Image (tube, helix red, strand yellow):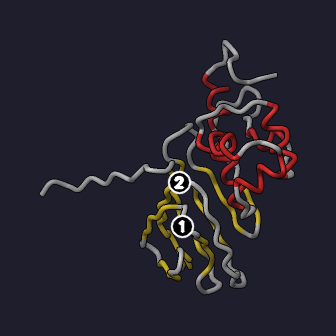
């Protein structure tokens, strides 16, 4: 059964399918693994995985079944389908490595938003990763340690950062206390547009 190309799918089905990409990316980030590692585990090409995460490719069972197995989650959790007859959007948090990641957007393509919650705990050893894309961070509470290339920074509440994700990067608690931050992720070459107020 291929979910692509089905006629007569309603906006509810479209919304469920659109949410798969952000959920896949959140699962991968929560497990701190690369697209290459997922490709090795599933036999799905890196380019296909990247297109799935960005919403440029609609998911089908041939792709979702090996991904659910690789991430050790039930298929319905991966898809996040709402209960029958329930029109509300259920944003299911993903927890791994002691961090909770909540996808905040469902639309395919464009910029994807996530909320990250790191509870109080021991300081972790940095394990920088690289992948295609561009990311923006905003710290809501606590102090976030950010390793970006050769830089080792601490961001406090109200501070923001932006960077090319092809630069090795890692995030963790700066002082063992809880941290909450927002991240916006876009495809390579995408930039945040900030409007200033007229003077």
- The C terminus lies in quadrant: bottom left
Residue 125 lies in what quarter of the image?
Answer: bottom right
Q: Is residue 111 left or right of residue 173?
A: left
Rendered residue at 68%/59% (across/down): 29
Taking depth in this image into account, of 1 and 164 the one nearest to the observer is 164
Specify the farthest residue to the left: 199
Rendered residue at 68%/40% (across/down): 48
Residue 172 percent location from the top left of the image: 63, 76
Give the SS element for disc 1.
loop
Rendered residue at 76%/33% (across/down): 83
Residue 103 percent location from the top left of the image: 62, 50
Residue 60 percent location from the top left of the image: 75, 30
Find disc 2 in the rendering and name its residue.
133
Rendered residue at 67%/13% (across/down): 7
Q: Are marks 2 and 1 in contact (CB under 8 Å)?
A: no
Residue 43 percent location from the top left of the image: 82, 44
Residue 99 vertical placement versus 114 (above, below): below
Specify the farthest residue to the bottom: 175
Taking depth in this image into account, of 198 and 47 the one nearest to the observer is 47
Lower position in the chain sequence, tag 2 or tag 1: 2
Residue 84 lies in what quarter of the image?
Answer: top right
- Cα distance between the residues tagged 2 and 1: 10 Å
Q: Is residue 116 left or right of residue 67?
A: left
Residue 56 lies in what quarter of the image?
Answer: top right
Find disc 1 in the rendering and name its residue.
167
Within 10 Å of disc 1 (Cα), the crowding (few <14, some 14-19, many 20+) is some
- The N terminus lies in quadrant: top right
Give the SS element for disc 2.
loop
């Amino acid at each position: 059964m291929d979910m692509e190309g089905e006629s007569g799918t309603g906006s509810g089905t479209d919304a469920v399918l659109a949410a798969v990409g952000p959920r896949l990316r959140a699962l991968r980030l929560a497990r701190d693994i690369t697209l290459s590692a997922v490709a090795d585990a599933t036999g799905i090409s890196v380019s296909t995985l990247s297109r799935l995460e960005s919403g440029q490719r609609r998911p089908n069972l041939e792709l979702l079944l090996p991904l659910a197995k690789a991430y050790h989650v039930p298929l319905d959790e991966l898809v996040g389908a709402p209960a029958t007859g329930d029109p509300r959007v259920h944003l299911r948090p993903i927890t791994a490595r002691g961090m909770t990641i909540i996808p905040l957007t469902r639309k395919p393509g464009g910029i994807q938003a996530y909320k990250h919650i790191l509870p109080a705990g021991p300081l972790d050893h940095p394990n920088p990763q690289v992948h295609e894309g561009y990311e923006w961070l905003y710290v809501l509470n606590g102090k976030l340690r950010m390793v970006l290339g050769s830089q080792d920074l601490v961001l406090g509440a109200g501070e923001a950062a932006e960077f090319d994700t092809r630069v090795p990067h890692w995030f963790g608690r700066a002082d063992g206390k809880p941290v909450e931050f927002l991240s916006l992720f876009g495809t390579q070459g995408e930039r945040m547009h900030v409007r200033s107020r007229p003077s």
